[in-house]
Image: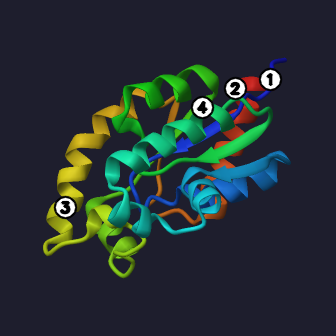
Amino acid sequence: MRKIPNIFIIGPMGSGKTTVGKKLAELLGREFFDTDRVIEKRTGVDLGWIFDIEGEESFNKRETTVLEEITTLPDIVLSTGGNVVLSKRNRELLSARGFVVYLSTSLDEQFFRTRFNKYKRPLLRGDDMKKRLHFIRETLTPLFEEIADASFISDTKSPNILANHIFHLLQKRFES
């Protein structure tokens, strides 16, 4: 019987990574982290401010630093930012240090879930939000798929059901 490794949840913004991650951490009895919240806590400002003042490149460096630290902690569930996979280093860290769960969602569902919080999601600022989401999706989907150990579609399942599906998959794969 093998022990369940650290769990890293990836996927596009609005796919439910944080909500599902928190519920999965409860089921596993583990500590939960969210890279975006860790960055906000450390800087004392929200992501929008970081993007406005320091820019996306600075944010990306902060994200890699957080990943390098948190992925070494034992027995955790970590939800990542939507663009975390753009960095090869980040993909390597996630792949090497835990079990990667990819939550995907349809473009329409993603738009529905993110449409009112553009400030908290700086990459969605601008006019045609659906077009931006489509562009981001085309860029990121192959990278998510490249490092995923398991994939789930989050459109029609509640976060509780998704977390339970992931939990049972982990039990089956690692504890049987």
Q: Quadrant of the C terminus?
A: top right
> Tag 4, which secondary structure?
helix
Mark 2–mark 1 contact, CB under 8 Å?
yes
Q: Looking at the picture, how far across and down is residue 145, in whole percent? A: 37, 32
Q: Mark 2 or mark 4, which has the lower sequence index?
A: 4
Q: In this rendering, would 27 be left or right of 146?
A: right
Name the mark nearer the viewer: 1 or 3: 3
C-alpha distance separating marks 4 and 1? 30 Å
Q: Which residue is mark 3?
A: 132
Residue in view at x 32 percent, y 55 percent: 55
Q: Looking at the picture, how far across and down is residue 19, in whole percent? A: 61, 63
Categorize mark 1 by other alpha carbons within 10 Å: few (<14), some (14-19), many (20+).
few
Name the mark nearer the viewer: 3 or 4: 4
C-alpha distance separating marks 3 and 4? 29 Å
Residue 173 shows which numbered tag?
2
Name the mark nearer the viewer: 2 or 3: 3
Quick check: 137 above or below 95? below
Q: Quadrant of the N terminus?
A: top right
Q: Mark 1 or mark 3, which has the lower sequence index?
A: 3
Query: Viewer-proximal residue, 118 or 164?
Result: 118
Query: Identity of the amino acid at label 4?
Result: Glu
Q: Looking at the picture, how far across and down is residue 150, in whole percent? A: 52, 34
> Tag 2, which secondary structure?
helix
